[in-house]
Structure formats: C-alpha cells, structure tokens
Amino acid sequence: MLTFRAIRLQSLLRVFGILQCCALGSGAEYTIEDAEGDLLFLMDSSGSILPYEFTGLKEFVVDLLKPFTIGPKDVQISFVHVSDDPMVEFPFNKYTSNAAIQWALLNMKQKLGDTNTGKALTYAKDTMFTEKAGARADVPKVLVWLTDGVSSDDISQPIKLLKDLGVTVFIVSTGRGNYIELKAAASEPSESHLYYVDPDDLYVIMEELRNNIRENIQVKKLRALDITESSFRLVWPRLLLGTTGYYLIEYSPIMNSQGKSWKTVTGEETSVVLGRLHPETTYEVKLTPINSSSNKYLVTKVTTLEEETTPRVVVISESQPRSFHVSWAPSPLNVASYEVLYGILPGGEPNLLAVSGNQNTTIVNNLEPNTTYLVTVSAVYQSGRTKALSVKACTQDVSSEVHKLKLINISASGAVALWDPARDKVVQYRLQCTRHRRSPSVRTVPAHIHRAQLTNLIPGTENRICVKAVYRHGVGRILCRTVHTPRHQGILSPKKPSSESFCTQKHMC
C-alpha cells in the first residue's frame, strides 16, 4: 500500500525527472461507490509481449480496478486476450467482487500467437457487449485496450463500429506503434483517452486513467471532484435527453443562504467548475434540469479546502563547499510541514529533508563542492495538498588548490614537479605543460601520487607548468609555476625523485 509520505515523494521526484520504476507502489487508498458501467479490457496476449511485460500489465489492471465497487448494480468487468483468435478470460457477469476479479487477473496465462487486434475488436462488438455476456443495456460501456502498439490486421473499421454502439475507447500503448492510427482509434479528446508509456512506468498514468474512466461511467448522484480552496468540479448523471433544456445550478454557503449564486449549462453537459469560492466553507449545491418531464433534482454539500499558498521566495545563502542555507517565505500558519528536496543537476539522486511547519529555514549538509543543485521547497497542508517552488543552488569550490607546487631537478629538457596533496576526496590530478611556442599537453596523475617527471622541454626556453585536483563533480583551483630551462645539459637541483613517484610519458610534459 502506498503511504501518504510515499505519494508525496513520488510527486516531488517528477520535478527532477527521475521517477524510478517500482520504487513506489500505486495501490488505491479509497473506494469508488458511485459508478455504474460495463468495463471491458482487451489486452495484447500475443508473442510480441514479453513475459515480464504481460505480468506488469496484469498487475496494472489489478491496481487500476482496486477502488471500484464490483457487482451487477455497480461496475462489471470482462477480459479478452488478443492473440491468433480472441480468447475470453471471463464475461461481465462471472465475478461480483473485487477480490474475485483480482484473483482471476493474477492467475491468467499469456496466450502468445499473432496480434490480431482487429479480429478481437470485432469479437468484442459482436459478442462481449451483449446481454448473453452479461452486459447491461442501460449503463455506459468502456473499452480499455492494452497494447504494444502493433496489430497484424486492420483496426479502423471495428473501432468505428464499437464507437457507433456508444462504447468509449481508452488505449494504453507500451510500444511505439502508429500514433496517427492509435489517435484515430481512441475516443475524443485523444489527450485523455490515449496513453503512451514505458512498460516499467505504467503506474505513472494509473490515477489519471482511473479518473478518466470514472468520468465516463454513469454516476448515481451529484458529486464534487477536484476540490480546492476556491473551486470544485460538479459531476452528475445525464438527466436531459439530446440538446433539449438546460441545467440550473444553485449554490450558497450553508451559513449564509443570502449569498446564493446561480449558473446554467446546456443539457449536453454533465459537469461544470464552480469557482471564486471561499476557503474552508461548506456549500449547498442544487442541480435542477429545466424543460424536463421529470421534476427530479440533485443536491449535495461540498466543503472547500483551507487556503494554501506556495512559497513565493526561496533564498539560498551561506553557501559552503559542503552545505548551504535554504530559506523561504511566506510561512502560512496552516502549513503542517515543509519538505525540501535537493539533488545534483542534471539527473542526480534526490534527497528529501523534512522541516517543521513553524520553521522557514534549514541547513542542507553533506553536499559536493563546486556543484549545482536543484532545490524544491514544498508546503504540505493538513489536506495533503502541496504547493512547491524550485530554485538552483551552487556550493562553493572547496579550498582544493594544489599547495606549494615546486619544480626541481631542472635540466635543459626536463624537470620534476612536486606538490602537496589537495583537500577532500581527490579522484586524480591533472597536469598541464605549455612548452615554448607549442600547444599545451595534459596528463593525469593518480590521486595518491604528488609528483611527476616532465620531459621533452626545449633547452633555453620558458615553460609553464600547472596542476589541479579533479573531483567527482568538478575540479579545484589551478596552481601554476614557470620554469626556465638552461641552454646546456645539467641539473640545477641535486635532488632526485624516488622511483615509486617517478612518472614519464614520451612527447608529453
């Protein structure tokens, strides 16, 4: 089961674009009891689907259906495999509980064979959406087609005939497929009926797909969705036929009936957004169909959420090589807590830091020097909703310049460079030599070695020697010295480097 904290971390991870598969669960924590419809799953079970992908699709469907109430007066489920020939796993009227549906889905086997989706769609139209298969005549019908985007036969005509029956078509494609073909096959608008997703990331679309399916299944009462501090969306069953008539919506705070507002929508609509509302206020809403032979009206009560504001300013201060301060404003009293998510750009592993709701600053430690971070501060409210703001932050360069670079054993064509070790975790040292009127040459030296032999210098010339420490996420400050080689052979310094630290490379400094 996905905990509230895991849900929060999942949404924050999307800021970084590094949402990992199977890192978080996706099971629903609520129950949908006000929906009624026949839902048919048409799933690719052919040989083009890998076994692990087939297992993932099964588990996706199980989690997708968890909140729905299954039964003859609620939501009915049927399942058909796409293979050489369509194969029915179970009809609409076989299972009447969510537990039974889950058991059946998790235990079904892949059929393999060819991907004859057109044949399966025709079978669904002729056989599945019928009274014999348990389908009901007076409820909405939805088809969810799970595919890798490939079909061996034509799907355009069968899809058209299904739509003509009033079936709403959702498509989840885990492959590339033909976008134009799939877009035409999905119900309109395609933005909310066609999903392209990697097989490992199916759970990313689960909540959106579930909500869109829910909106297409007839509701039994007036209800509110997408509730915020200043608005909510009303959804109701169709009470008017065709384009005749309209709906009158009356709403007012229950503590102030004098503040009543009105809104009308056409008879074709089954939802509307009511805005400009007061936060933390309970409204009584009444929907009346006008020009209807029925006097039926629907009533509900909706309470808006507490007022929630995002941090408008996030300030990074006192930046050090391994830490920086993060501060933000404003700090509303109704914030339960803050979450500071930070990670290296681009694509670094994120870290989550929890901060009390009565604080507006914190210190982020254990950072990499000379590195850019993305920092996101989220205000978490009692309702579970969040407001977030992101900024970039840079740590200071560590005092990592190489100290006391010395050049000894200077001869007409060479010298030895020695330096003190730099601070922090050095990966290697980078040594650069600019010889007289020649392009610079660069070599690397292991982190545990602090000296190097310079060769092929030109007698009687000036050569510039530079060394800097290389770290995992950047480099330290460079330190340079200039050496003047004598015109004739001879060593200006009597010292010799030890053999274990003696490094040479022909044609390079």
Image (cartoon, grey):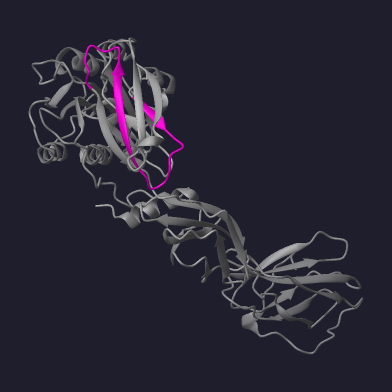
Question: Dividing the image into 4 quarters, which one contains the C terminus?
Answer: bottom right
Q: Please determine whether, in this image, residue 190 is positioned above or below residue 473.
A: above
Nearer-the-camera pick, 227 or 118: 227
Q: Is residue 177 visible?
A: no
Q: Residue furthest bottom?
A: 494
Which residues are the magenta region? 271-296
Q: Is residue 118 visible?
A: yes
Nearer-the-camera pick, 104 or 131: 131
- Residue drawn 59% across and 78% down? 448
Q: Position of residue 115 (x, y in %)?
A: 27, 23
Q: Quadrant of residue 64?
A: top left
Count of labels shown?
A: 0
Nearer-the-camera pick, 67 or 275: 275
Q: Position of residue 469 (x, y in %)?
A: 65, 71
- Residue drawn 72% across and 76% down? 453
The answer to whether residue 502 is left or right of residue 1 is: right
Q: Quadrant of residue 420?
A: bottom right
Q: Position of residue 203 (x, y in %)?
A: 32, 42
Residue 372 among those drawn in magenta = no
Q: Position of residue 35 (x, y in %)?
A: 21, 30
